[in-house]
Amino acid sequence: MKRRRFLYGLMSGTLLGCAPTVATESSAPQIVKKKAAAVASSYDVIVVGAGIAGLAAAQAIQAAGKRVVVLEARSRIGGRIWSWRNWGKPIELGANWIHTKTGNPLVNLAKQAGVSTTSDPEEAGDERLIDTINGTSLTGSALESHYTRAYDIIERAVARGDNLDTDVSLRTSISQVAAFKQLNATNKRLFESMLAQIVDDEYAIESEKVSLFGYEEENAAYTGSDLFVNGGYDGIATHVAKNLSIIQNTVVTKIAWGKSGVTVTAGSKSWQAKAVIVTLPLGVLKANKVTFTPALPSTYQTAINQLATGVLNRCILKFDTAFWGDTYSTFTIVGNDPHQWYQMIPLNGPYGIPALAAFNAGSQARALEAKTDAQLTAEMTAIVQKAFGTKKSSNGMVATRWGQDPYALGAYSYVPVGSPIRARTVLATPVSAQLAFAGEAYTNTDPSTVHGAYNSGRKAASAILKTLG
Ligand SMILES: Cc1cc2nc3c(=O)[nH]c(=O)nc-3n(C[C@H](O)[C@H](O)[C@H](O)COP(=O)(O)OP(=O)(O)OC[C@H]3O[C@@H](n4cnc5c(N)ncnc54)[C@H](O)[C@@H]3O)c2cc1C
């Protein structure tokens, strides 16, 4: 079966919750801790944010013999890499996959860090689509033919962009494709669920909002299949963070920058350096949580405004037994709303935990973030019971709310309809010799991924190092 290009890992940020388990930031390992009060005031470079981009940047700067400090708001490192261990194994609540393994530096980093990976549930070969409306299910070549048609329709929609002068949404273009118009009611329902997997997962937003011109325009740096990280993605972050000076629990609020250097402020404390690399998530920048003095040049502010942040959340229910079978494979769930609860990954395969992880993305995910854990449990349980013909209830739950996480304010970035993809290129270019951005949103090379963020951090470090001399 043709693989969905990115199937994002177990969801997101602010743990929605789950009875009886309560997840907290402190449940993640805390690797490097220093007291803010003890900090020296002068560095060559300050890195804001200890996600993978910030860690990669700081590591490269330190390796060049420069003095660097990383300031991080949370009580853990890794940012949108978040391995949650309350059920004994490191279940990923942010990134879960290493995409395109051939040539991907994360593969070596995982090996060096001793982080195990396993086969991709999307490539396990025995995927099953369960139509909860009419009680049927599809597997094997019958299912594959539906995916083939779904990809064909999307590819035709994207190709239509070559003849357009003005951007439209991917959805608008899909609606003009003859093969889409010809779908009967049942096939249309199946198509919509597959579209949610292909687009909503990858962009953290529905196809109605995605730019046709921006769709899949980003370079793919590497090739090959994906790896599912089951040995704790945070081990990679810890490995990259080795020997770095990282100050946690430090919420940066101001960045003053100029030819004479930079001052970064968090509460009543401030740090000075020759330059700063800012790896704040796009959602945090868009919400103006950090003030730049002087203000960012208008080209940069415009680019920040032009890009958007989507949401991808996961809700995981744990049961007494894996009554769905001994499998690694993804379940596609077709229900009344193709954008909600459209996909479930069994965790018994990769972790030996009898749990199902369901995905919700985009505006539907934002809407679900308003619900209580009990409401989410009830909704997902009803779907699981219908899909698998069982009366079983869960005995544990965890869910995420990346859209409400104050230090993420979204899952990852996308190019909305009408915005130019070059906005990413603008933000990938250092603002000055003293200020550069790095992170998943500020690159045209595999944005929205861990390796894209990692490479962006290294690139920003190399640019700043050149100017530091
Ligand atoms: C649910 C989900 C699933 C995903 N699945 C995958 C996947 O399977 N594979 C993949 O490759 N990618 C995946 N991604 C994307 C990937 O996680 C990100 O692209 C990548 O981790 C981003 O790294 P970053 O360093 O750019 O940002 P972040 O990891 O967000 O790092 C930024 C850091 O800045 C900190 N910060 C924020 N505000 C402040 C402040 N005011 N002061 C100081 N520090 C601050 C944050 O706490 C954070 O640590 C997923 C993301 C999500 C949310």
Image (cartoon, rainbow, N blue to C red):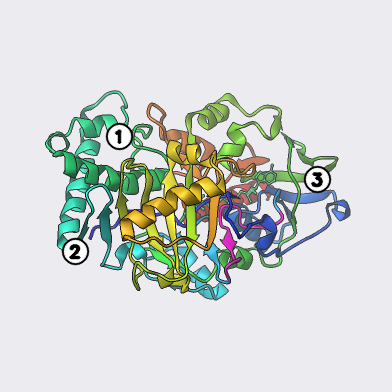
Residue 195 appears in the picture as rendered: yes
User: Residue placed at 58% from the left, 71% from the top?
Assistant: 88
Kindly identify which numbered label has been placed on residue 140: 2
Earlier-in-chain disc, 3 versus 1 = 1
Can you see residue 161? no
Rendered residue at 70%/31% (across/down)? 291
Main SS, magenta residues: loop
Q: Which residues are magenta?
A: 75-87
How many residues crowd around disc 3 within 10 Å: few (fewer than 14), some, or many (20 or more)?
A: many
Say if the magenta span includes residue 259: no
Say which of 253 and 104 sits in front. Answer: 253
Q: Earlier in the sequence, mark 2 or mark 3?
A: 2
Mark 2 against mark 1, which lies toward the viewer? Answer: 2
> Does the Cβ of the disc 1 residue fall within 8 Å of ligand 1?
no
Task: Give the residue number, with chain letter if any, for mark 3.
Answer: 271
Farthest right residue in view: 38
Locate residue 388 relative to residue 429 in the image: left or right.
left
Q: Where does label 1 land, which residue?
A: 170
Is the residue under label 1 in contact with that under label 2 (CB below 8 Å)? no
> Which residue is depicted at the point 37% across and 57% down?
385
> Which amino acid, by three-letter code, is at mark 3?
Trp
Quarter of the picture containing the N terminus is bottom left
Instruction: Please report contact status of discs 3 and 1: CB closer than 8 Å, yes or no.
Output: no
Q: Label 1 is placed on what type of residue?
A: Leu
Which label sits in the foreground, 3 or 1? Answer: 1
From the top left corner, tell me how far across and down residue 389 is, in percent. Answer: 31, 60
Question: Along the polypeptide, which appears first: circle 2 or circle 1?
Answer: 2
Determine the CA span between mark 2 and mark 1: 28 Å
C-alpha separation, residue under disc 2 versus residue under disc 3? 58 Å
How far, Cα to Cα, is label 3 from label 1? 45 Å
